[in-house]
Image (cartoon, rainbow, N blue to C red):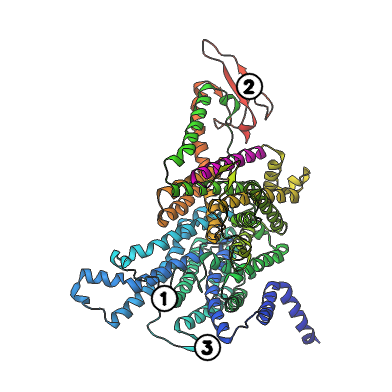
Amino acid sequence: MRSGTGGPRSIRRLVTDHGELVALAAVVLVVPLVLPRRPTAGVVGLGAVAGAALALQAVGLVLVYRSNRFVNFAQVAFGAVAATTFTVMVHARPAVRAVQSVCPPCLERVTPAVRNANYALAFVVALGVAAGLSWASSRLVFRRFAAAPRLVLTVASIFLLQLLAALDNAVPRFLSTRAQRESAVAVRAPAPLPFDVRLRVGKVVLHAGDLLLLAAAAAAVVGITVWLRGSGRGTAIRAASERPERAETLGVDVGRLDGQVWLLAGLLSGVAGVLTATSVGSGSGSAGVTPVALLVRILAVAVIARMTSLPVAGLAALAIGVLDQAAFFAFDTSQVMDGALLFAVGGALLLQSDRRSRSDDDSAGTWRATREVRPIPAVLAALPVVKAWRRRAVGVVAVVVLGLPWVLSSSQTSVASIVLLEAVAGLSLLVLTGWAGQVSLGQFAFAAVGAWVAAACRLPFPLAVLVGSVAGAVVAVVVGVPALRLRGLHLAITTLALALAASALLLNPRYGGRALPARLARPSLVGLDLGDPRSYYYLCLAALGLVVASVTSMRRSRTARALIAARDNPAAAQSFGIDLVTARLGAFAVSGFLAALAGSLVAFQQGGVQVLAFPPERSIRLFAFAVIGGLGSVGGPLLGFAYEGVLSLASASPLVVGLSTGAGGLVLLLLLPGGLSGLFASLRDTWLRRVARRHRIDVPGLLGRAGAVGGPVGGAAITPVRADGPTPPRYELDDQWALS
């Protein structure tokens, strides 16, 4: 009787505990039956190989999450740098050239034995690069954020992703000669293993690299699972991940264990990248997909595994790999799968939202890393010297932004226009992330919706922009309804999948792009031809000015205060009568409207909706520059995208831009969480302190004192204090600025 009831109970428990995996298995069984072309055995074999690469990356991601409780978006970048190092060392042979330069007679010619030795060295060095980068990241970057909220570490990993992407682009320059680059030596081409073992599966032949990838994935999933469950070190790692302080009191070296986890995660990423490079080369991700598409696939696997189960991660990777290859075989493109991943990620996270633990809720909290930039106290703002300096600052900014098109070329002016529109989209992040605390990595998906609607409706320019902006707001609300159950990193993962889906399906000429006109007519407004880059620049500047004025006015309203209250303390906000659902959906609507406004204007600026204008990578870059500028004030995103504009106009080098974005973002996040706006506010406050002392005005908050004398809080009451002699009266100020 017990055995008879155990089967159904086991099935029910499997469905309850791993409903996402069961649903995915059902999809794997059903989808091939309804595809236009049913996958063959060879397609399934290729899918297993792709799934093996995903499994290795996902296992590393899960290990870091279990150890540090945050999602490491840079996990895939370790393997990417290792793969590029491997292929460049194989094809450009820097080690052989180094030996020949030191001892020419030692290597007069490159024999097969030398090539094999160079290949082995490249393999070992590439794996060492991946493991070393991962370990160094844990020590130099993430350990410094140990006391920060987990969401801050996730944002730090996004900056690290930017930095490693720049390093990946720089590797060929460091390891190859100018002659090799000028002769177009394919340093990123596939580097097959010196030996070959073939396995025919239908009409597809799996080579030695593919078979090694399958074996490595199986060994990693099984071996690490057994190690974590059965060994003392694995038990210590699990204990340290749950309660690091308690583990340290029991004598566990948490720092050393954390370093070992990162070393292992980097090694797994390196194995996946290098073995994949033996068949498809480097710089193209896995199976020819873009880096963000590969990242979303890895995140989908980890989400289905609930960031904890390595066996489930292995099975989910296998399933997604097979589905990916089946969709590619049926439709001759991987973009169908790119769109389907949104439903896989979103559905899995929604199923798990009711079963999150307390630690998960802590790690998936809202974004509160940026303090509000306080305004200048009224008593100081009224001083003539402060008024004069404010007028000068406004005058300098006005001269620069108004005169910029007259010193730039037409192409540079177009770049400056795009930066202005990205600043508009950055202000949409201020509303959604800075005020509402909802982290979005897919903001340019709403911009893509606005561009698509504005172009497809074929209305006159002003109406088309308005309709596109409203459409973005509607779509943002539709996305926001299920997103209300997701917070922090969970929402970030979902919106990144949304950005990938919008680029893959909405703008794809084979699907949603069919409704788009081949060319948008030159826009005109009140009889003014805006086809000239200079005229369109001023239009973008006017749009940015209107958005800045609107957002500034919104910040002073009850709406923004309700959003910030709901971000900081939802329970307290509800007790004061704030409807959290309405407030957050309103933030999504305003954010979507602003992002879609920017997208609509981008479409007309470029004369059409181009897929390359709205890639998912652009959403990550948008978020990065918004955080660099600071999400604590309206001026923060403006400073961030002014920084981007300087980079774009000064240098087109991916290395310079990546270093300035990735390294600069990490430094600011560590030293100045308020971003460039926080730095500007600190410099401004230093100057205001000198002004206050010179005029004998006591501003307690400005001078670093907690208290104030006289006057109600928020009333900006000024109380004169008797002064002896001819010195001017001394004032003490008590206002909300001092306590904010």
> Which of pointers 1 and 3 lies earlier in the amino acid sequence?
1
Q: Which mark is drawn over residue 203?
A: 3
Task: Name the spot of residue 491 as percent of width and height, x first.
Answer: 64, 58
Task: Name the spot of residue 27 as percent of width and height, x first.
Answer: 68, 77
Task: Name the spot of residue 729 as percent of width and height, x first.
Answer: 56, 15
Report the amino acid beneath label 1.
Pro
Which element carries disc 3, helix, strand or loop? loop
Task: Name the spot of residue 521 as percent of width and height, x first.
Answer: 57, 53
Residue assigned mark 1: 190
Cα separation, mark 1 vs mark 2, equals 73 Å
Q: Is residue 555 visible?
A: yes
Residue at 73% from the left image edge and 63% from the top image edge: 354
Q: Which mark is drawn over residue 718?
A: 2
Which element carries disc 2, helix, strand or loop? strand
Q: Which mark is drawn over residue 283?
A: none
Residue at 51% from the left image edge and 63% from the top image edge: 258
Front tag of 1 and 3: 3
Report the amino acid beneath label 3.
Lys
Q: Quadrant of residue 173?
A: bottom left
Front tag of 3 and 2: 3
Vertical arrangement, residue 573 with respect to residue 61, above or below: above
Q: Is residue 301 visible?
A: no
Q: Is residue 423 left or right of residue 576?
A: left
Range shown magenta: 531-555
Residue at 38% from the left image edge and 64% from the top image edge: 171
Q: Quadrant of residue 307?
A: bottom right
